[in-house]
Image (tube, helix red, strand yellow):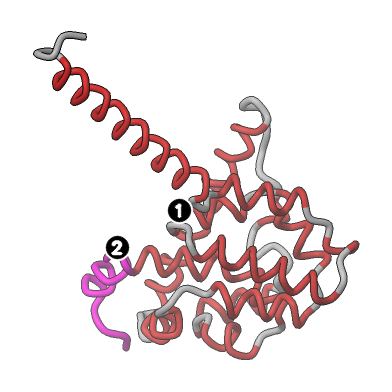
Amino acid sequence: MSPRSRPLWYSLAGLIAAWAIAYGGFALVRHLKPSPAKIRALLQSTDLSKLSPDERRKAIRRLADLLNALKPEDRREARLAGEWRAWLTQMTEPEKAELLELTLPSGVTQMLSAFEQMPEAQRRRSIEDSLRRLREARLQNAEAGEGGNASPDPGEDPFATLSPEARDRIVSKGLKTFMDEGSADTRAQLQPLVEELQRNMETGGSFRNRRRLGPPK
């Protein structure tokens, strides 16, 4: 290496080293960043029935931390995994209540109160739209997992196991009472619907429709 070209080679080597460090850091961050795939891996690798009470508590809190770090659409995708339903069936009522408290997005209470102030027709439309989006997401997830030949499990519908009276009450009165006073099972079952409603309201769709329909009579 000639003295004249040595600085150029040193600069090039430094640039390559800096790029390698930056790429390595990006790859590490990407590896550590929570994702629906990481939640599925946790659900698949952890059998709650074989854990001690303290280990179960740590696993549930780990799941909550991962879920809270996701974007809303990724939270919805994570819940579509069959392993999610398997975990819920193994969890006790207090464990479901704890997971719910740890993972409810901020602002849900205010959203539920605002939702109850909407005209009944708009509440009904918002619930129907949210359920439709959840069903479409489940269908897409099922098709992706089964090579395009699957259909979503109707048992995944948040309304599937609720009585007709409960469904009518949700539409006519709102969801706040169910989320405040319902069992942990019911609250966990309705959480995806609540989050979908919140997404709809935050994007402005429900409020635009509310203004168009006018105030409640």
The kind of residue on which mark 2 rests is Thr
State the separation of the CA atoms marked 2 and 1: 13 Å
Residue 14 image point, x, y percent: 25, 29
Residue sitting at x 36%, y 31%:
20
Q: Which residues are magenta?
A: 202-217
Q: Is residue 87 left or right of residue 156?
A: right
Tag in front: 2 or 1: 1
Query: Residue at horizontal 68%, vertical 80%?
Result: 97
Queried whether the magenta region covers residue 204, the answer comes back as: yes
Residue at point 64% right, 63% down?
A: 63
Q: Residue furthest left?
A: 4
Between 209 and 80, the one nearer to me in the picture: 80
Query: Which residue is identified by label 1?
Result: 73
In the image, residue 84 sits, relative to residue 18, either above or below, namely: below
Residue pointed to by mark 2: 203
Name which residue type carries label 1.
Glu
Task: State whether residue 8 is above or below residue 177.
Answer: above
Answer above or below: position of 79 versus 175.
Answer: above
Task: Point out residue 110 in the picture as x, y percentages from the top left corner.
Answer: 39, 85
Residue at 29% across / 63% down in the picture? 203
Q: How crowded is the residue under tag 1: few (<14 C-alpha within 10 Å), some, or many (20+)?
A: few
Q: Which is more N-terminal, label 1 or label 2?
A: 1
Please state which of residues 196 and 83 is positioned toward the viewer in this rendering.
Answer: 83
Q: Residue 118's x, y, as percent?
A: 35, 81
SS at mark 1?
helix
Does the magenta segment cover residue 179? no
Label 2 secondary element: loop
